[in-house]
Amino acid sequence: MNANVAIQQRKSLRFRGRSFMALVFAPEEPLDEWLAELDEWSAKSPGYFVGRPIILDVSGLPLDKEALAKLIADLGSRNIRIMGVEGTKASFLGLGMPPLVGGGSASAAVNDLPDAPPPPAAKPSAPAANENANPPVMPAAEPAEASRPASLVHDSPVRSGQSVIFPQGDLTILGSVASGSEVVAGGSIHIYGALRGRAIAGSTGDAQARIFCNKLEAELIAIDGLYRTADEMDPQFRSRPVQAWLDGETMAMATLS
Amino acid sequence: MAKVLVVTSGKGGVGKTTSTAAIGAALAKEGKNVVVVDFDVGLRNLDLVMGAERRVVYDLINVVQGDAKLPQALIRDKRVDTLCLLPASQTRDKDALTEEGVSQVMNELREKFDWVICDSPAGIERGATLAMRHADVAIVVTNPEVSSVRDSDRIIGLLDAKTARAEKGERIDKHLLLTRYDPARAERGEMLKTEDVLEILSIPLLGIIPESEEVLKASNLGSPVTISNPLSGPARAYADAAKRLSGETVLLTIPTDRRSLLDRLFMRRAA
């Protein structure tokens, strides 16, 4: 009993993953002309780039360290702050320069940008990320279509060493999740089989996410950054069909009848 | 139509080499043309278990690198003449195996034999992935013990992802071979039960090989257990497994070593 109280009193540190939509600049040679074009464009919609998360993709450019620093400074003088650089070496990015990013995926929403400047109201929700010295997860998320909630069905067992990661929404596994494997979802996780590995739900900060499984043998379960290892789970739930959810700052579990 | 079979497990010491030799010999005794290929380059063992260590001249690496022709490297078994061995090299390491070279050797073997049985090294590195690369059928050797089961699960995942068949979008046939099984200890809860292993791995069971001193005896004699003592428990279990591989339906039992009544009484008292 005492041990339980101690666990609940400890304020746990929570890390969250979150996806932001970022604009990606891919400058072309010669840079002077590209910057002139950019000036021309932003003259038509002033203030468009202010406060927007912007990634600089220099993978097509043979820039050295100085040239890259100059390009970032040139953009800075136009009030365009770069939050991350893609396609260069980490050693080119010294102190005071944006960090290296990678692994982004294309997003259709901003492809038509140069021709038709969208209304300034369409502003991403968290420009504050620029101020953060170490922005967390960079990949631009696919904008979920409003009409159809994102979900993924994985119709084979998840074997040891494999991970199934679906930050966009709910994840359903038809089969067991083996010891030494992990399933991660932005939303809830449904497992029609035994859960013997790790299940991490609400990975992008969804405290409403739940975990359901036919048989609980999990090594670890986590919802919205709050986790519980096998040792900390109530033994009465072992080998039974169970759901887990967040009740405030504690994880609640119950058997499914 | 030749079939390439890989015997794999992830974990070491569970009985891959023993099973390769025993099943290879059992299939050969049924009249099939069989070659057993040792992929454990650098730590070769199959030649010892087959009793051919004194006859190795050329090996898999020599053939892969073009220093020898395939017929020069194949060693024909002295006891069963439809059984051949392609040994591994002890002096080289797994980096000497190239993807194209292995693929060419496998194609040549497919033309000559009915069954090509590849003895995979332990682990999930290059040697193991090359051994499973061209397989049509896989035998996953597992001991009734948690670490072995987890490693087998990992290997099953790789079989579904890294083989040539999987990359073409086809499925590879996977069979579970449970080795070193002791029914009495499983009953007492000292070992995982067959049902537990099957539930975790969810692949069909090819056979259960009982724990037996006959296996070690056969290895030390340099003879597959299905040749040295065909009436022993493990030999009968391996022979049944080989029949199931060829498509026969054989009732699954766990054969034990036959003992006289006196022996049994004595054993019971000793235990």
Image: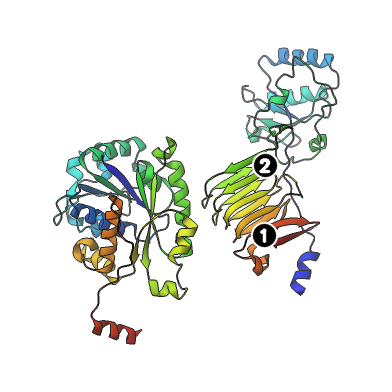
Q: Name the element at disc 1.
A: loop
Viewed as shown, does residue B54 lie left or right of A238? left
Viewed as shown, does residue B166 lie left or right of A146? left
Task: Say if residue B223 shows up in the picture.
Answer: no
Above or below: residue B68 compared with residue B5? above
Q: Residue A28: x and y, percent? A: 66, 17
Task: Say if residue A235 shows up in the picture.
Answer: yes
Give the image quarter of residue A112.
top right
- Identified at 33% across, 62% down, the residue is B252
- Identified at 45% across, 63% down, the residue is B195
Above or below: residue A145 compared with residue A207? above
Q: Residue A177: x and y, percent? A: 56, 53
In this view, the residue in front, B251 or B216, is B251
The residue wearing badge 1 is A256
- Identified at 75% across, 70% down, the residue is A4
Q: Name the element at disc 2.
A: loop
Give the image quarter of residue A253.
bottom right
The residue wearing badge 2 is A167
Marks 1 and 2 in Cβ contact (< 8 Å): no
Viewed as shown, does residue A2 lie left or right of B111? right
